[in-house]
């Protein structure tokens, strides 16, 4: 790679952090005197994005957490897929899975992954009225409280909006595997840079972003 790590890390950050197409990132780098093709940026995103995301620190799980679960349809090649997502009470994305079905088996798979990765059960789960969640919860975590109500699940539903913006910019995803790879990096970046609702004052947001950028430079090996 003939470009320095700082350029590669900056390009990957621009692409996953903001609703920009590859060509837009190419143009922004050109404005800074960096001549690189959008295909090279695509390669950087595919190669380095997952590596960066894997190094980002994870939020420590707690038995007092509340898991908000929801699913959203994504059309790929004329076929419907379902992106199942879990976020906690602060909007932190816990996990996402692209699946072909919207049923109990799919809901059970999401809960199984959450239990394995989190290492503890939540205080409760909150979902919409889809019955598959209740069936999966009774099979895997019968002692956990389950609240099923459309209005209570706004936190999970709102977590889909940033991805919808990216989907429009990217003119849809080309394959379910590409969607899974993208959201794993995209959500890891949002978890780092977007503060919790309790830290939404101007100064708190500013300090949070400074700390997030410093951590990003550390994990990408570009810290001074």
Image (tube, helix red, strand yellow):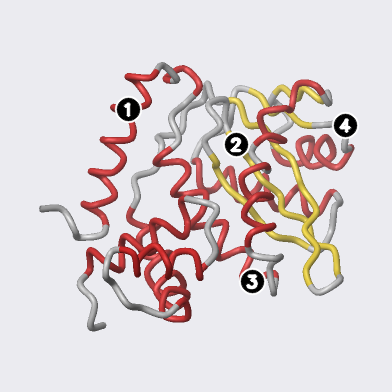
Marks 3/1: CA–CA distance: 35 Å
Residue ID at (72%, 54%): 83
The image quarter in which residue 81 lies: bottom right
Residue where numbered disc 3 is placed: 177
Decide which of 58, 146 is in the foreground and name it.
58
Picture layout, residue 46 above or below residue 141:
below
Look at the numbered disc 4 and give the secondary structure of its residue. loop
SS under mark 3: helix
As drawn, 77 above or below 203? below
In the picture, the disc for residue 130 is none
What's the distance in space between the residues labelled 3 and 4, CA to CA?
Answer: 28 Å
Q: Is residue 26 above or below residue 92?
A: below
- Disc 3 + disc 4, Cβ < 8 Å: no
**Residue with the mark numbered 4:** 129
Local secondary structure at mark 1: helix
The disc, 1 or 2, on the residue closer to the chain's N-terminal end is 2
Q: Earlier in the sequence, mark 2 or mark 3?
A: 2
Give the labeled residue for mark 2: 87
């Amino acid at each position: 790679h003939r470009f320095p790590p700082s350029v590669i890390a900056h390009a990957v950050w621009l692409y996953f952090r903001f609703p920009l197409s590859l060509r837009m990132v190419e143009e922004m780098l050109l404005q800074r005197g960096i001549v690189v093709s959008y295909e090279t940026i695509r390669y950087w995103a595919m190669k380095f994005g997952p590596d960066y995301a894997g190094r980002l620190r994870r939020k420590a799980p707690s038995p007092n957490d509340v898991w908000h679960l929801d699913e959203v349809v994504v059309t790929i090649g004329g076929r419907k897929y379902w992106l199942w997502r879990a976020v906690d009470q602060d909007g932190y994305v816990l996990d996402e899975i692209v699946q072909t079905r919207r049923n109990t088996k799919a809901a059970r798979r999401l809960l199984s992954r959450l239990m394995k990765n989190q290492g503890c059960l939540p205080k409760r789960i909150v979902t919409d009225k889809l019955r598959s969640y209740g069936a999966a919860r009774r099979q895997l975590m019968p002692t956990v409280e389950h609240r099923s109500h459309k209005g209570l699940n706004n936190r999970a539903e709102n977590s889909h909006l940033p991805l919808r913006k990216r989907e429009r910019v990217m003119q849809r995803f080309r394959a379910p595997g590409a969607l899974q790879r993208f959201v794993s990096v995209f959500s890891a970046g949002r978890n780092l840079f977007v503060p919790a609702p309790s830290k939404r004052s101007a100064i708190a947001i500013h300090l949070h972003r400074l700390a997030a950028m410093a951590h990003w430079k550390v994990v990408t090996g570009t810290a001074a």
